[in-house]
Image (cartoon, helix red, strand yellow):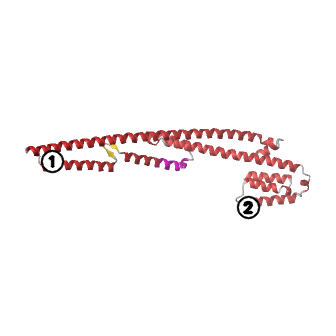
Amino acid sequence: MNFANYMAARGIKGAAGAMPEIYRNASLQGQIGALDQAEASDQADLARRRTATQTAYDNNVTNLETAYNTDLSALGSDYETRKLGIQGAYDSDLTQANADVDAAGLQAYITQMNADREAALKKAAMSGYIDGKPTVDNIQYQQKVTDAAKKNYEDTIGQFSNDYSAEINNVQGDGDTSNDWQVAYLQAARAQKIKDQEATAAKKSQQDIDNQQEWARINKVKSGSSADNKIDAKVSANNLMSIKNDIGSNKKINRATAISVVQANSANLSNSDYSSALKWVDDNY
């Protein structure tokens, strides 16, 4: 027995019989509002975290660039200083004719210093590190990898839709802090899922209320019609069977359309068969 039948059996007809569901729908609407606020809060929190992370990243890049340029400048200055010193000693030795270092050997040493410097720079470009610290290019590459991983996680987060809470517990309890950022994404997805479920329930509840009110209105009209009493019971029964067959044979028909079909044929049914048709739709759609 559906809600309308239950209330009708107790003498409550029309819109009054649907008031409890209307109040329940109002409560659901309030819950949806609360979920909207919670979602907005989660989104704002996620935005703040993203901004803080980006700011920290930009500051780190700036600091590393400054340190890198400072180290490179110091290396260049040291190189030039040594080069001048060696060149000065070389010239002095040649001038004084008592050089302890062979001129060819000194030139070879200078050449080797240049080669070592170039090799160090190439190695840094290949490894992403210089003097044990990551280069700017390496930092930017790692950030791109992280961003891509987060985007992919967000795009495939639906795989945990059966139980977001369980996955949140897994991430928080795995002892790995590098994936803690996933919690915010999971919490946002869980809030959206709850919001969607509540919205669907509220929409169905409102549709049920509308159907029950329409059902009560039409029943009231039919109960006051004298023409309905003249319908032959056998004819009405045949019409009822035909209506059910027409509705049941259409695989794409929905609840609202099925009710409309029954209402359109109300003049061809007795009161009892009309109620029976509506109950059949209510039970099957």
Residue 242, quarter of the rendered image: bottom right
Q: Mark 2 points at which residue?
A: 249
- Using the image as rendered, state which of residue 24 and residue 141 is in the foreground: 141
Name the outermost residue toward the left: 98
Helix, strand or loop for disc 2: helix
Where in the figure is residue 124, as x and y percent of width and height? 31, 48
Q: What residue type is labelled 2?
A: Ser
Query: Mark number for residue 80?
Result: none
Residue 40, quarter of the rendered image: top right
Q: What residue type is labelled 1?
A: Leu
Residue shown at the point (83%, 47%) measured from the top left: 217
> Going from the N terminus, do you reach mark 1 or mark 2 first?
1
Helix, strand or loop for disc 1: helix
Q: Main secondary structure of the magenta part?
A: helix
Q: Name the residue under label 1.
A: 106
Is the residue under label 2 in contact with that under label 1 (CB below 8 Å)? no
| 217 falls in the magenta region | no
- Using the image as rendered, state which of residue 273 and residue 62 is in the foreground: 62
The magenta span reads 148-160
**How many numbered discs, if any?**
2
Please tell me whether mark 1 or mark 2 is closer to you in this view: 1
- Is residue 176 visible to us here? no
- Is residue 253 visible to us here? yes
Residue 161 horizontal side relative to residue 4, left or right = left
Alpha carbon separation for disc pair 1 and 2: 100 Å
Mark 1 neighbour density, 10 Å: few (under 14) some (14–19) many (20 or more) = some
Residue shown at the point (32%, 40%) measured from the top left: 70
Residue 126 horizontal side relative to residue 217, left or right = left
Mark 2 neighbour density, 10 Å: few (under 14) some (14–19) many (20 or more) = few
